[in-house]
Image (cartoon, rainbow, N blue to C red):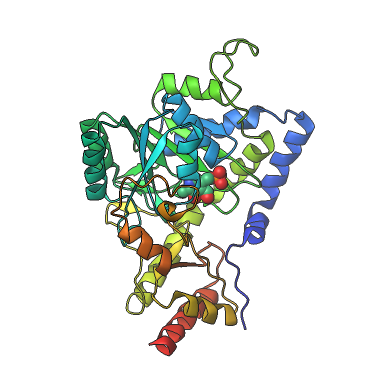
């Protein structure tokens, strides 16, 4: 029986071995472990890759969100809209700066923020005279949200946008890459992300020079021109030089990896369409397939069957934010039924670029068998 890995970082490491060793040896011999030259080199490469004017690297995807909120002066009592169906860091960052999340429902097949639900929540907040400040959208599972729609909603209501692109770096919407789709975009380099490092890491993208300058200050204790001139209440949130060196090596194969993920996703979608609810990718978008997520009302049984056949599956996420004990109090929007339903039905199957054709076939066959047995 095949033994499938949910993610295969060791195969990836073999692919980049030579270049990775060269890059890491250089960091060791330079010994500039904080803000060494690789950090700036990575920032320039990532800005070029996305065509955003600026890339500011930082210590994690969570810190990227917190830094972005701080850079926009969002704080105590401000309202920030974010999806309920997301990783907890999205809501956590809003609360960390003293602002309040208003949870928004998501589309049932794209998993991204629902624009109609967002507009209703904006109306509700306005009628209560709450201080609405920003939308924090999330490109769940690697699919960019529709930023034309979000930018126009933000403009109408004078809101900032922070795109949480932790899962979607490399994704495309209407010929523009994530990072270049809205005012501020954040990403995560957590090892399991499409572009991941060997620890924690993140980055922020913007075209706004003032925001870029402020973010560079905020990630280094709020420093001004001199190291000990402190202009803002900041953080220690820089990306390590070693992680930048790892990312530079991985960036070389990143486009190939995205192509492979898309090739596998296409096979999955063709083969699984008749048995499961599959993800929906609009024609004008490219997902990076951080996850390939399907839905079943018999989720536990299907996952159990996969496990018995050595196929790992994961649940992202078993509880929406509005049901989390820590965030339950933020319940202004009650219309969150899609998020609740998805949290009961979704599960993700392996989609890393190092899956063999045999493994992909085996995963499909096993899923079809599970579906037939449970009908
Ligand atoms: C949607 C989303 N936002 C934020 C984060 C936080 O990123 P990090 O783990 O790098 O702090 C993650 C990470 O899983 C994520 O998936």
Residue 37 relative to residue 267: left or right: right
Quadrant location, the C terminus: bottom left
Tell me: 233 left or right of 13: left
Farthest residue to the right: give it.
Answer: 29
Task: Where is residue 95? Give x, y as percent.
Answer: 47, 37
Any part of residue 230 in sight: yes
35 up-or-down from 363: above or below: above
Q: Nearer the viewer, residue 194 or 187?
A: 187
Relative to 63, 123 lies left or right: left
Q: Give 284 or 227, whichever is nearer the viewer.
A: 227
What is the x, y in percent for residue 354?
57, 64
Please give the name of the residue rendered at 32% of the width and 55% of the height, measured from the top-left corner: 336
Q: Is residue 158 above or below residue 227?
A: below
Residue drawn at point x = 47 percent, y = 62 percent: 318
Q: Position of residue 123 (x, y in %)?
A: 21, 39
Image coordinates for residue 230, horizontal then vertical, percent? 59, 13
User: In the image, what residue occupies the spot 43% across and 28% down?
Assistant: 76
Q: Is residue 251 visible?
A: no
Q: Quadrant of the N terminus?
A: bottom right
All told, the count of numbered labels is 0
């Amino acid at each position: 029986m095949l033994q499938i890995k949910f993610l295969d970082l060791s195969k990836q490491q073999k692919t980049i071995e030579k270049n990775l060793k060269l890059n890491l040896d250089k960091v060791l011999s330079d010994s500039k472990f904080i803000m060494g030259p690789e950090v700036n080199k990575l920032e320039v490469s990532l800005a070029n890759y996305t065509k955003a004017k600026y890339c500011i690297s930082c210590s994690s995807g969570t810190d990227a969100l917190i830094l972005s909120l701080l850079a926009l002066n969002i704080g105590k009592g401000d309202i920030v809209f974010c999806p309920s169906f997301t990783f907890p860091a999205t809501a956590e960052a809003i609360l960390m700066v003293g602002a309040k999340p208003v949870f928004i429902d998501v589309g049932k097949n794209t998993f991204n923020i629902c624009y109609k639900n967002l507009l209703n929540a904006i109306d509700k907040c306005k009628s209560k005279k709450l201080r609405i400040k920003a939308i924090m959208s999330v490109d769940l599972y690697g699919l960019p949200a529709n930023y034309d729609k979000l930018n126009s909603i933000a403009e109408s209501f004078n809101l900032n946008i922070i795109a949480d692109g932790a899962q979607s770096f490399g994704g495309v919407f209407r010929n523009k890459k994530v990072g270049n789709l809205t005012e501020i975009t954040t990403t995560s380099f957590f090892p399991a992300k499409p572009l991941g490092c060997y620890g924690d890491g993140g980055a922020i993208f913007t075209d706004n020079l003032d925001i870029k300058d402020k973010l560079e200050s905020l990630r280094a204790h709020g420093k001004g021109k001199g190291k000990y001139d402190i202009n803002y209440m900041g953080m220690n949130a820089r990306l390590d030089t070693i992680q930048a060196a790892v990312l530079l090596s991985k960036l070389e194969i990143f486009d190939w990896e995205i192509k492979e993920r898309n090739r596998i996703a296409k096979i999955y979608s063709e083969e699984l369409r008749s048995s499961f609810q599959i993800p929906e990718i609009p024609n004008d978008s490219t997902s990076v397939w951080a996850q390939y997520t399907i839905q079943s009302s018999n989720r536990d049984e299907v996952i159990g069957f996969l496990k018995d056949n050595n196929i790992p599956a994961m649940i992202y996420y078993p509880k929406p934010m509005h049901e989390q004990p820590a965030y339950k109090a933020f319940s202004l929007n009650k219309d969150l039924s899609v998020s609740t339903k998805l949290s009961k039905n979704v599960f993700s199957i392996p989609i890393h670029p190092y899956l063999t054709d045999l493994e992909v076939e085996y995963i499909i066959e096993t899923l079809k068998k599970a579906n037939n047995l449970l009908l």
